[in-house]
Amino acid sequence: SKRAWLQPREKTYGFEQQAGHTQVLMNAEIQKKATGWYCDVCECLLRDSASYLDHVNGKKHQRKLGYSMRTQRVGVEQVRDRLATVTEERRRAEEEAKRRRGLDTNQEYERILEAREADEAAKREAKKDAKKRKREE
């Protein structure tokens, strides 16, 4: 077939951001039908987010986008390579997060030490001033 292989989805549909929001559809025919989720590609109205997601993953919608429902066959080595890549990316992200947390912790520790030293210096100065005043009396 001349249709493209089915591809993994790159975008999210953002159901969390759309929760609690309404959108007025300008097409009078759609407004008469009911409320729910509207698919612009297929021009159909679906009752809830679960049926909308099923529709988006379904054959009719994918065909209108130009995809066949067939997936590309891959070998064991390609799967291993992909898993190794994902594992390495995840490990790097975790190391970066640890490094950032470490920097933040070290910076906080240094800030606390500097504040303590400043307090101690202020106390010493106050003590010296008190002794000076006592001598003068």
Image: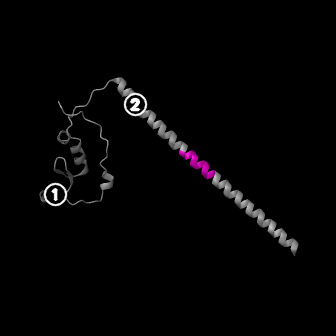
Residue at 69% x, 57% y is 116
Q: Quadrant of residue 20?
A: bottom left
Residue at 21% in and 44% down: 55
Q: Main secondary structure of the magenta part?
A: helix
Magenta stretch in the rendered image: 100-109
Q: Position of residue 117 (x, y in %)?
A: 71, 57
Q: Residue at x 47, y 40 (%)?
A: 93
| Label number found at residue 78 | none
Dot 2: element: helix
Q: Is residue 27 magenta?
A: no
Which quarter shows the C terminus?
bottom right
Is residue 105 or residue 67 the one in the foreground?
A: 67
Asked if 132 appears above or below 25 in the picture, the reply is below
| Disc sitting over residue 34 in the figure | 1
Mark 1 secondary-structure assignment: loop
* Crowd band around label 2 with a 10 angstrom C-alpha radius: few (<14), some (14–19), many (20+): few
Q: Disc 2 marks which amino acid?
A: Leu
Q: Quadrant of residue 113?
A: bottom right
Q: Which residue is mark 2?
A: 83
What type is the residue that disc 1 sits on?
Ala
Q: CA distance from mark 2 to mark 1?
A: 45 Å
